[in-house]
Image: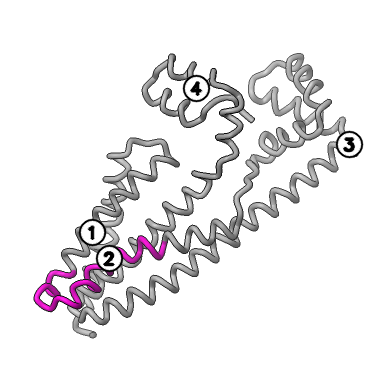
Amino acid sequence: MLSRSLDKAREAYEKRSVERTRQAHDRDRQEALEEHRQEQGRYVKSLIYGGLDGIITTFAVVAGVAGASLSASVVLILGLANLIADGLSMAVGDYLSTKAENEYARAERDRERWEVEHYPEGERREMVELYMDKGIDRGDAETVTGILSRHPDAWVSIMMVEELGIVESEESPLRNALVTFVSFAVFGFVPLLAYIVFRFVPALQGQSFWVSSVLTALTLFALGALKVRITARRWLASGLEMLLVGGLAAAAAYGIGRALAGLA
C-alpha cells in the first residue's frame, strides 16, 4: 500500500503546489492503509456513465415524442420502457465486460506465473528488453531485473503491466452491474419527472417538455462536472461539454420526431 494520498496528490498537481505534494506523500502510513481499504470511488465510473447514458437516452425518447407532438401518455410509456429495457441491457453489458476483463487478467497472470516458474531466463531477458526500450541502459536494466526476479509476485505483476499492458482490477462484476442499473434508472427518470408530476396538474401539462428540458440540462451539467473524478479535468468545462453532447442528441431526436410527425 502506498503511503501517499492519491487524492491529495492530484489536488497538489492541479494547483502546482510543491508543499501540498510533500504533505500528500509525508502522511502517516496507517492513515494511507485505511484509505486504500475504502471502496468509495471504485464504482464512480459505472455510476457516472450509467447515469449519463440513462438521462441522454431517456430524454432523446422524450424529445422525439415531443417533436412528433404525441401525447404525454406516449412519452411515459416509451420513456419507462426505455428506462427498464436499456437499463437492464447496460447492466448486463457492464457485468459481462467486467467479468470478461477479470477472467482474462487472471488467465494471463496464471500464464505469466507459469513462464516465470518454468522459463525464468526467458522472462528475465524480456524484462531487460522492456527496460531498455524505455531508455535504461543494459547494465542498469539487468541490475533492476536481477533484483525484481528475486520476488516472483512483484515480478509477475510488473510483467503484467509492462509486457501485456494489463492493469488488474478488483472490481466486482455484480456490483458494477447494480451500480450501472440503479444509476441509469435514477438519472434516466429525471426527464420523465415533469410529465408524471404535471399529469396531476392539467393546467401545466403543456409545459412538461420545457420543464423536462431544464431538469435534464441541469442534471447533465452536474454529471459532467462529477465526471472530473475520473478525467481530472476542470469541472466547468466537463459540465458544459456533457451539456452540449446531451443537447445535440436531444436536438437530433426532436428534429427526427418533427420530421416524422405525419406518420404518427
Q: Sequence order check: which comes first, mark 4 or mark 1?
A: 4
Q: Quadrant of residue 37?
A: top right
Whether 197 is among the magenta residues is yes
Q: Where is the N terminus found, in terms of image quarters? A: top right
Evaluate if marks 4 and 2 touch, with contact meaning CB atoms under 8 Å apart. no
Query: For numbered disc 4, what is the local secondary structure?
Result: helix
Which mark is in front, 4 or 1? 4
Nearest the camera: 241 or 174?
174
**Mark pair 4, 2: CA separation:** 41 Å
Q: Is residue 37 visible?
A: yes
Q: Sequence order check: which comes first, mark 3 or mark 2?
A: 3
The magenta-colored residue range is 184-208
Q: Quadrant of residue 113?
A: top right
* Residue type highlighted by circle 1: Leu
Residue to which mark 4 is pinned: 24
137 with respect to 187 (left or right) = right
Nearest the camera: 57 or 80?
80
